[in-house]
Amino acid sequence: MTEQLTRTPGPRIRPLVRPVPAPRRPVRHPHPEPHPQYPQHPAGTGPRPARSPRAACDGPRPPYRARTAAPSSTGHAELAGRFAHRLVEVLSGARPVHQLQRHTTLPGFHQLAALVRTGPLRPRGRSQRPRLGRVHDCAPGPGAVEACVRVEFGPRHHVLAFRLEQHTRTGQWQCAAVETR
């Protein structure tokens, strides 16, 4: 008499920190450098005109940067941006609060649960999706990141601030404090 046990799949939990991607492979046959004397434009196309007078005065544009993270010297802008997005989802009711329980300390979870109960970021009237502004972060000390983000619900604006601390034993980042206005 053998019984076969089947396991039901549990919830899939994604870590907050993603592994660092491997460096890209070099190109085998790079394009030759253009000759400085001869333009490389096909006949009749030429360079594209600037869209505005100010753009014509500027030099080459800087590379594209994601809107969710402001320039940061802490190196944790991506982490703060991802956590801010998850916090706004919880506070607006799109995600249950218990999904962030693993990623918060006990006092941080109590603050988050109290904010969810009072509902400062709940959409009122017509359901609108929240829009996040730039995430500004700073490192007040080693193993700690403090960040703030502006959240827009149509004409209403809120500010969300939170503190992430790195657990000493596991190295996992956890939210220690949350505040919104």
Image (tube, grey):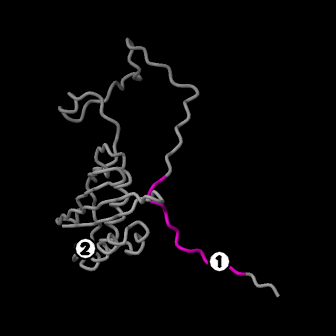
Q: How many numbered marks are there? A: 2
Counting from the top left corner in percent of width and height, residue 147 is at 28, 56
Quadrant in which the N terminus appears: bottom right
Residue 123, disc: 2
Residue 67, disc: none
Residue 90 placement, left or right of 121: right
- Based on the displayed image, in which of its 4 quarters is residue 36 positioned? top left
Residue in the picture at 33% in, 46% down: 74
For disc 2, the neighbor class at 10 Å (few under 14, some 14 to 19, many from 20) is some
What segment is highlighted magenta in the picture? 5-18
Counting from the top left corner in percent of width and height, residue 124 is at 22, 76
Residue in the picture at 39% in, 62% down: 174
Q: Is residue 133 above or below residue 41?
A: below
Residue in the picture at 37% in, 68% down: 105
Q: Is residue 12 magenta?
A: yes
Residue nearest the observer in this picture, 57 or 1: 1
Q: Give the secondary structure at mark 1.
A: loop
Q: Which residue is mark 1?
A: 7
Residue nearest the observer in this picture, 174 or 63: 174
Q: Give the secondary structure at mark 2.
A: loop
User: What is the residue that sits farthest to the bottom in this orientation?
Assistant: 1
Give, as a three-letter code, the residue at label 1: Arg
Q: Is residue 39 above or below residue 14?
A: above
Q: Is residue 116 above or below residue 158?
A: below
Distance in Å between CA atoms under marks 1 and 2: 38 Å
The disc, 1 or 2, on the residue closer to the chain's N-terminal end is: 1
Residue nearest the observer in this picture, 115 or 37: 115
Quadrant in which the C terminus appears: bottom left
User: What is the residue that sits farthest to the front in this orientation?
Assistant: 169
Counting from the top left corner in percent of width and height, residue 135 is at 28, 53
